[in-house]
Image: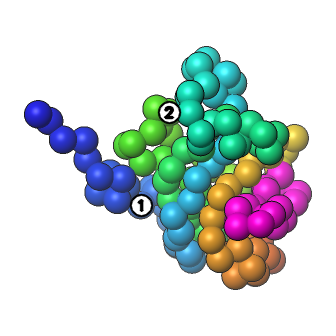
Amino acid sequence: MARRPSPASSLSKPELAPGERIILAKAANLIINSGDFGMDPIEGAAGRRSMMRGLGDESLGGRLYLTNRRIVFQTHAMNRLLGTVPIPLKSLTSFTDVSFGLSKMMKLEWDNESCVFVVWGIPRLLKEIEAARNSPESRAS
């Protein structure tokens, strides 16, 4: 029987532009609405929990990278939907802690788009995003 790769082994660092560097990397989940991607919702407790909160019906596991120019989320191979979400720091209009209870979540807004990540260590992450966004390096990109 063939084994699927473990989530950790299927992740590689994002491709970086010249002068771009990774500041912080964290395990994270991106909350999505599966219908937005032409997929049926997953049955079971995980989907129902997210739907009840009005956030989406599926979470994509992966890694969230903060660079000196952007935020990049890369899914791992254990998801139904695979891909990368790049968000330029200069496009961010809002980044906030929307946690409640034990669910640690951060909402990002940019160019009339938004997304919610489940991620630990939000206070530090928000401080690092603010510092990177205000650095001359992020504005030069």
Given residues 96 and 100, the one toward you in this image is 100
Q: Is residue 120 left or right of residue 79?
A: right
| Residue plotted at (36% across, 53% down) | 7
The image shows residue 22 at horizontal and vertical percentages of 52, 72
Considering only vertical position in the picture, is 110 above or below 21? above
Given residues 128 and 8, the one toward you in this image is 8
- Residue 82 appearing in the image: yes
Q: Find the magenta span and give its range.
A: 89-109
- Residue 135 appearing in the image: no
The total number of labels drawn is 2
Magenta residue check for 44 = no
Task: Specify the quadrant of the image occupied by residue 117.
Answer: bottom right
Q: Between marks 1 and 2, how big is the CA–CA gap?
A: 18 Å
Task: Specify the quadrant of the image occupied by residue 97.
Answer: bottom right
| Residue plotted at (58% across, 20% down) | 39
Query: Colour scheme of this structure image?
Result: rainbow
Identify which amino acid the numbered label 1 is placed on: Lys
Q: Mark 2 points at which residue?
A: 81
The image shows residue 51 at horizontal and vertical percentages of 74, 36
Given residues 10 and 93, the one toward you in this image is 10
Q: Mark 1 points at which residue?
A: 13
Considering only vertical position in the picture, is 4 above or below 105? above
| Residue plotted at (88% across, 57% down) | 93
Q: Which quadrant holds the N terminus?
A: top left
